[in-house]
Image (cartoon, rainbow, N blue to C red):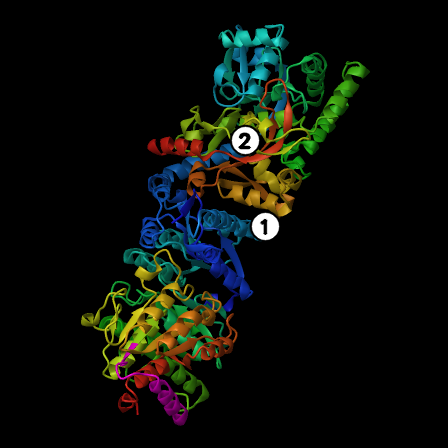
Amino acid sequence: MPKKSFISKGDYRDSVFLMRVNQECQKLDGVKACAVMMGTDANKDIAKDAWLYTDELANAGPNDIFIVIDAIDEAKCETALAKAKDLLNEVERGESAEEMSYRTLRTAIENEPDSNLVLISTPGEYAFTEALTALNNDKNVMIFSSDVPIDDELKLKQLGSKKGLLVMGPDCGTAIINGIGLGFSNIVKKGPIGIVGAAGTGIQEVTSLLDDVGISQAIGTGSHDLSEKIGGITMIDGIRMLGEDQETKVLVVISKPPSPAVTGKILEYLRKVGKPAVVNFIGGNVSDEGNIIGALTLEDAAKKALAIITGAQPSATIFSKPMEELEALITQETKRLSDKQKYVRGLFSGGTLCAEAQVLFRNMSRPVRSNVPLEKDLLIQASARGVGDTFIDMGTEEFVRGIPHPMIDFRFRNERIIRESQEDDVAVILLDIVLGLGANINPAGELADAVAKARVNGKSIIASVCGTERDPQSLHLQVSALERLGVIILPSNAQAARLAALVASRGGAWGYLK
Amino acid sequence: MTTKLFRQDIKVINVGLARFYEDLKYQRAKVTKVDWRPPAGGNLKLIQLLSKAESEEVANANKIAVKKIVTSSPKLIDIKRARDVIGVLRGNMTLLHSGPPIEWERMSGPTKGGVIGAAIFEGWASDARQAEELAKSGQIRFETCHDNSAVGPMAGIISPSMSVYVVKNEENGNIAFSNLNEGVGRVLRYGAYDEEVQTRLKFMEDVLSPLLKAALIITGPLDLKNIMAQSLQMGDELHTRNVASSLLLLKELGPSMVNTDFSKSDISASIDFIVKNQLFFLNIAMAAGKSIMDAANGIRASSVITALTRNGTDFGVRVSALKDKWFTAPAPIPKTLFFPGYKEEDANPDIGDSAIMETNGFGAFASAASPAVVQVVGGDVKEALRNTIKMSEICLIKDKSFPIPQNNFEGIPRAIDLRRIIETGTAPIINTGVANKKPGMGTVGFGILDAPMGAFIRAFEEYASTL
């Protein structure tokens, strides 16, 4: 088997860029497999696992790019390798001819003194220094990078809070500030609802569902903000900022359940602000009290906030579709199932959406195994074979090491859809499809092959699409493309989870819903 | 906590994933891109040393160095015979050469050619073979220009009988020297040594130098900072383009030249020589640069680079804190725009003390002032500006005394910080002339290059060990 490699010494590109090169190479004539990556140990391990390791890779360090091509013959290998090298350089040339860029944040700030927000997505070990530079220069920051030590996070947040600067993150995937989407976010109309969230896809789901009325700001806090150690510094600052903001009439707060102490603090600040505040601690119930309104799901949070604006009575939504249509759908999907097919396998790109679906299943007496489970005893290794209802959060560390997030790169999810569809007892494959900035430009196209195979294997595919019309992918185009593939699309993650349970239980789950 | 952020348009600096930058562009948001890479290429040892070097002691030392640089006031005060002002040239057969120290065996073609030419010019040898014998036998001693308060472009050969400019840094009180520029083509500094070269050198000693000296006495000391700042605004970067500065010099000295006792034909030949040489002012600018950098050299704990220079074989670097110590790496071959008839294989590795201009914030650092120069390597106006901004990333200041109109009158980036070179992995860019690698030939073109990182890494490791 001919395998060829090349190392570009002292050459750094971000993983998304390298993936794009990788993707292009994969399509070249005669190429069976390829890897274009930074030469970190983790990436070299990935290459080893993929049978794409060559001895030359021993010479690749973390600041070198390696290319490995495995093709059907020597000649094709050579051609592909040459093309891969071209691709690495081509884009670089294209870019440098176009735009002015700076090599360091320090110089960028010097030359753009009126900038007011720094978006940091370096590898985690470097994020602290960059964020500190930003804060010391009086810039707000959003830190997309994860793997920042909690002590460093505390230092940054204390400094930011003291200086009156917003510190979103580390591990903050989503924010919308003054109508501009940052990181993984959706293009949403300006309006009266302000959001603070510790949960990235949670913010995406709520803001997308609120596209009709619009949002003022969506502040991401990062996933560790509500830990005991940080104590919700960013969330409290965010609540205060939205409290003072004239355009914000209603607040929505989203997070996985914080500790009781931190929960108390958050609710206390919300009471102090006084504006109506809808709270969704995914799986942790908050009861209505004063200006605080509890919401069970992300969709409920959006609907309740909307009701306050329109003056309607806030009520929970089970399904948006009329009952007859739903019954017909359930019948149509169950008809395809054999008696053995009883379980749901959820393959999620959004961690919050995965958690929310688990909560809904738990409420329908269907405990779900997961790599990020609600209870410890439901833990299952991400790579292990699913057992019963199993939901996998595919955005966790083990999936994204050296590889773009599953919202961008569908490789692992597609593999997993096919694998799960070969299991006899699986009835439904439940998916979340997240559109918007940062996400893959055509998820329906990426999923087409895997979904077709899963359908041939007799599975029902149920999904929600999180996005808006103005997103680069356009909500309705993606929905209709996915429906043409035979995917059942529901307007929210919660509804998709409910329908999955209904199909798998042949309608049995109605008992919990009606 | 205020909601000020909510009342402004957001203007983002994106540090990391290019996709986020593109998405902000897609939304028509104001966004600036940082082409982020791990500091020091992710080298943990260097990252540790860098954090050690981010101290108040270093910051204070650099403040002193910066002050020395910006307050320097170089004046052209005289023209003298080299042997009369440079101690080592008295007595035995001694020549100065450019770059860090080097012995005859390792000298490149153009340096050897320069040595041969100077030996003939001094009358130590009657032909090339004899001159080579002298050099090989060790009878000719070699010293660097830099170690003797001097600088010379390309081979940088200064022999005892040559005239040198005397530049005084009045603020600091030190003196620096450089020889007179011969023009381009078959010239000694590019390693040519034939009859044409000898005749020109003789003219320069017999006519041009004494005339300029006499004119300078009439005009009085020339404020070089003034001429340099003006010429920067007129499209020079003062290294490979010295068109405006040379004419400004003539403007200052021309009237006085006419008022000397020299014959009309001598004056006419000299003016003709100056106007035909677009690099005439370079050597004066270099002496000015040397007088400034020597003033900033030897400051304890300062990470400011005080010399970048090449001898055609090695590239040498000095850092203020380590004073006279050289750190070297093999000199690279510049990316070259060749004169017709020459090609890649003819080019010698980088050579000359003229990178003292970049050391001072001119040359490639001032590219934005002189877009014509980046055209040499196929660049455009944007690229010129980009080079200047890129160099500002490794410099401590932008010197308002030398504003660049094309960069919104921002000052040229000056005071190169060794720490920033290591941190960003950005080596100084240098504009340069390119010599034929064979002795006796001359110029083959003009080029541009990145200084070799190896020399800076070695310098930094030793520098950090002294902190």
> B179 or A347, which is in the foreground?
A347
Residue A238 place in picture, x, y as percent: 38, 69
Number of residues whose C-alpha sits closer than 10 Å to that of mark 2, classed few (under 14), some (14–19) or many (20 or more)? some
The structure residue drawn at horizontal position 48% and vertical position 76%, both measured from the top left corner, is A481
Is A125 part of what is drawn in magenta? no
Quadrant assignment for the C terminus of chain B: top left
The circle drawn on residue B379 is: none
> A202 or B87, which is in the foreground?
A202
Quadrant assignment for the N terminus of chain B: bottom left
Mark 2 element type? loop
Question: In this image, A152 relative to A434: left or right?
Answer: left
Dividing the picture into quadrants, the one containing residue B271 is: top right
Number of residues whose C-alpha sits closer than 10 Å to that of mark 1, classed few (under 14), some (14–19) or many (20 or more)? few
Q: Give the range drawn in magenta.
A: A323-344
The circle drawn on residue A97 is: 1
Q: In this view, does B465 lie above or below A501?
A: above
Q: Which chain carries label 2?
A: B
Residue B449 place in picture, x, y as percent: 55, 35
Measured Cα–Cα span from mark 1 to mark 2:
24 Å
Residue B415 place in picture, x, y as percent: 50, 36
Residue type (three-letter) at the residue carrying disc 2: Ile
Mark 1 element type? helix
